[in-house]
Amino acid sequence: MEPQAVFDLIRNGEDSMVEFKRDDVRNCDLAKELVAFLNLEGGTVLLGVEDDGTISGVARDRCEEWVSELCRTKIDPPVIPLLSLARGVEPGRDVLAVRVGAGPDKPYARAHRGGRTYCIRVGSTSREASREEIERMFQASGRIRYGLKPALGATFDDFDSRRLRDYFERVLGGSAPAGDDREGWEALLRNLDLMTETGGQLVGTVDGVLLFGSRPNRHVPQAGIRALCYPGTEPDYATRADEDLRGPMVSLVGADGAVIGRGLVDQAWDFVRRNTMPSAELHGMMRVDRWDYLEEVVREAVGNALVHRDYSIAGTDVALIIYSDRLEVQSPGRLPNTVTVEGMKAGVRYARNQTLVNVMRDYGYVDARGMGVRNRILPGMRAHNGTEPDLIEEEHRFLVRLWKEAKPS
């Protein structure tokens, strides 16, 4: 690293990607900073720089070997840092830049005195992660499945028995236990990870309640969709519509094929229909309504948001927002560790909540091949009105933006 690059980093001060440390920092304290960077987006520690930006220099013997060793023994899983020594930043004073990228094996922990501490970076500070934050990192990595956790208080009586029977008999084309065979039903739901045992009792899992619960929000408060419609292009206090969509994800279909109980995806499309105005087109002698947004694209976007959102983030629903020029579907949580927006466009498959994905595919709510972005959302809107949907990953959410019409060139 050139001295000028060091000066540039120092001039901007400590932030979410830069930390200053004296040369005599303890190995466990340096490991804490590196772990926090690894669990965020990566970052650089400048060794030999005081908190106020004064350059004190590196005097430790074989400093680079010392850093490499602590990255192997004090960080779990071990990492290999990028080390760059800037010589003569000030006369007789060198600075060692220790750089780590966003770790592919999150979450990382500091290993010290036989224990593991998970750290995160918040602004210019590294701190120990809370239990909820640790759980979220493990879920994002795919190393735990939040949906298999028990939804406390949810017994078999909290499931919608009609939806369960409809799923096993109509959707899957199989058979189901008799209505009074509670033991048979509980065994079936347990085998499919829709129920689990905890404390000697059989209770519904988060996934089970989300899919087939009579009132999912009683047990999983973050289940549901916040649906809003604004008259303009920006959020405003004045809304045309503001609704909380509640209920199980899947719809209930009667013997005649008609929907008699609307699930969340169907409720979402109903909201879009009520709050957008179709235009009429003549196909031969027939009048055909043309909606601003293609139905199968909206359903795919909403279904994906529901099955892939991070349910460990409490207090926030999936959001469906209609503006005068666009429609947005916002899903709480970042993409899992190895998934990128470009990868999704190319057809990369992933599942944060595999049970939800499996069941919603059975119903046809999401692409059966797991490539809904590539096969439905992108080509669907291009064919519908020539627009290119936006896929945007932000710090705490993933957003799909559909445009009402093509932008002027």
Image: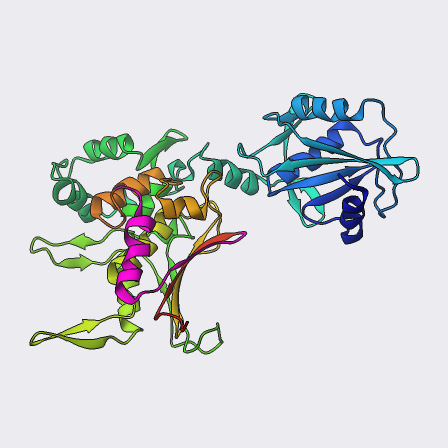
Tell me which corner region of the image, top left, top right, bottom left or bottom right, holds residue 28: top right
Look at the image and tell me whether residue 155 can be seen.
no
Tell me which corner region of the image, top left, top right, bottom left or bottom right, holds residue 404: bottom left
Q: Is residue 98 left or right of residue 57?
A: left
Q: Is residue 10 left or right of residue 104?
A: right
Residue drawn at the location 37% of the way across and 56% of the way down:
224
Vertical order, 152 against 64 (above or below): below
Q: Pick whichever, 145 or 125, lies toward us.
A: 125
- Report the label total: 0
The C terminus sits in image quarter: bottom left
Q: Position of residue 393 (x, y in %)?
A: 49, 52
Vertical order, 254 against 2 (above or below): below
The N terminus sits in image quarter: top right
Vertical order, 79 against 345 (above or below): above
Q: Is residue 300 left or right of residue 167?
A: right
Question: Residue pushed farthest right?
Answer: 91
* Magenta region includes residue 370: yes
Magenta residues, as a range? 369-395
Tell me which corner region of the image, top left, top right, bottom left or bottom right, holds residue 256: bottom left
Residue drawn at the location 14% of the way across and 35% of the way down:
177
Look at the image and tell me whether residue 84 can be seen.
yes
Residue drawn at the location 75% of the way across and 48% of the way down:
14
Q: Pick whichever, 258 or 11, lies toward us.
A: 11
* Magenta region includes residue 33: no
